[in-house]
Image (cartoon, grey):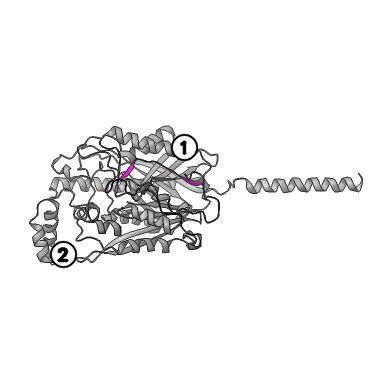
Amino acid sequence: MNPWHWWRALVVVGCWIGFLDTLLEAAPRNLNFIPVGVARVDLSPTNAVPLMGYAARAGLPAPTNLAQHIHARALAIGSRSQAAVLIAIDNCILPGSITDDIRSRLAQRVGLAPAQVALTVTHTHSAPCLTGAAPNIFARDLTPTEQEQIAAYTVYFTERLEEAARLALERRRPARLSWGRGSVGFAKNRRTPGGPVDHDLPLLRITDPNGELRAVLVRYACHCTTLSGELNAVHGDWAGAAAEAFEREHPGAIALVAIGAGADANPDPRGTIELATRHGEALAAEAARLVKLPLQDLPTAPACRLQTLQLPFQPHFTREEWIRRSTNSGIVGFHARRWLARMNRGETVSPTLPYPVQTWAFGDRMAMVFLGGEVVVDYSLRLKRELDPQRLWVNAYANDVPCYIPSRRILDEGGYEAETSLWYYDRPQRLSPTIEDQIVEAVREQLPKSFRIDPACGESPPPRTPMDAPRAFRTTRGRPPHHAGVP
């Protein structure tokens, strides 16, 4: 072969090598597998127990009937003692004491730090009462029988949560994590017609190395109050219906459902099991659409951080104010009489409320936030302005539900979320308007600085309608979107 032919052959081979390198560079890197385990256990009560959620149930007998089974679903991500465990629970109000107990058990058994364990509840108003949860819910003292029923279920509940976490840890095997975001539209602001809501539906997808779906985690910011207090039976509401519908259509997969900052949003319409099923199936259908998309890979287990803030109350009532309030009927009078009794026993009133803020950062690709309490939508919208909304996931009802967590705006407006609800939770006073800045700053400090919005990029124009608010300040910082599935 003459030299020219050799030279031409080398050029052709070089071009092919360069082309193949380009293809390999562009191909998905499927070697970044992470050990992941999932589990589901039944939480349906085996004894008669009062249901949480509605004061109107005060005169109803403790039910034994199930309109739908309720569950704890657990997800364990990562290897050995570096794993992160999330337990998504069908219940209304999670006392922090139960979270502390579960974290202590997992620390002793597998060496997990508290920041590596997160618990969320769906806030269904048709689940059993737990010891320490909203103790004034019925605006009267619990009877000895009710206390025994609740205590028995709480022991069973806690043991089942530990079992779910243990099974998820035992079942870890290589998996691929990816995430994206869609939306559903049945949440409606319950305070103000046309008021702000967060319709985003982030989804975490877990697949085996061969692509088989193992689990999803979704989050939607809406109360689980499709069902009224007249249904004195156990049911998971729309969140339970969503998990059930997704798992029915994807045999072998487990669907975890968490709730976002939707404490001031209700499902619309509402009132029947059929409507709860409709809302749940709408969410499941959107999740089914998302799992088929080319979502953004998460090649690393999360870096976990946890902090307990001390949120200040507004100045406490004086004894004279308590005495005047104690003459009222209903929750205001009952709440005041309980606090007067404490004062008469010489007990002191704390000026602050312990409050958990937890974050899981999946490298620089996604940050998951866990906020305690019944968090109103303003927190989600503000965090999406100050942190990159393309990479942010905000959960509420996480780790402890001590009361509603109102924003400065809602505290100024007043009403149930700002004040009356706190009496059912047995809190001594309204929270201070400073708590909003305190919580947001804690989230900002926990996450890597790369998640913060670059002021040089500027902001999008303000939303034209409240419905536009969740997406009003999205920015890609000059980069392509971080993942598919973003509307």
Q: Is mark 1 on a helix, strand or loop?
A: helix
Q: Residue at x 26, y 34 (%)?
A: 272
Is 107 in front, or is 361?
361
Side of 54 where 112 appears, left or right: right
In the displayed orientation, state which residue is furthest to the right: 2
Above or below: residue 269 compared with residue 304? above
Residues in magenta?
Answer: 177-197
Q: Where is residue 287 in the image (x, y as percent from the top left)?
A: 43, 39
Q: Looking at numbered disc 1 in the image, what kind of residue is underneath it?
A: Arg
Q: Name the residue under label 2.
A: 317
Q: How far apart are marks 2 and 1 (CA)?
A: 52 Å
Q: Where is residue 364 in the image (x, y as percent from the top left)?
A: 51, 56
Q: Could one spot residue 253 in this view of the protein? A: no
Kindly indicate the quadrant of the structure image that contains residue 229: top left
Is 187 in front, or is 165?
187
- Mark sitting earlier along the chain (2/1): 1
Above or below: residue 436 compared with residue 234? below
Q: Mark 1 points at which residue?
A: 289
Question: What number of labels is visible?
Answer: 2
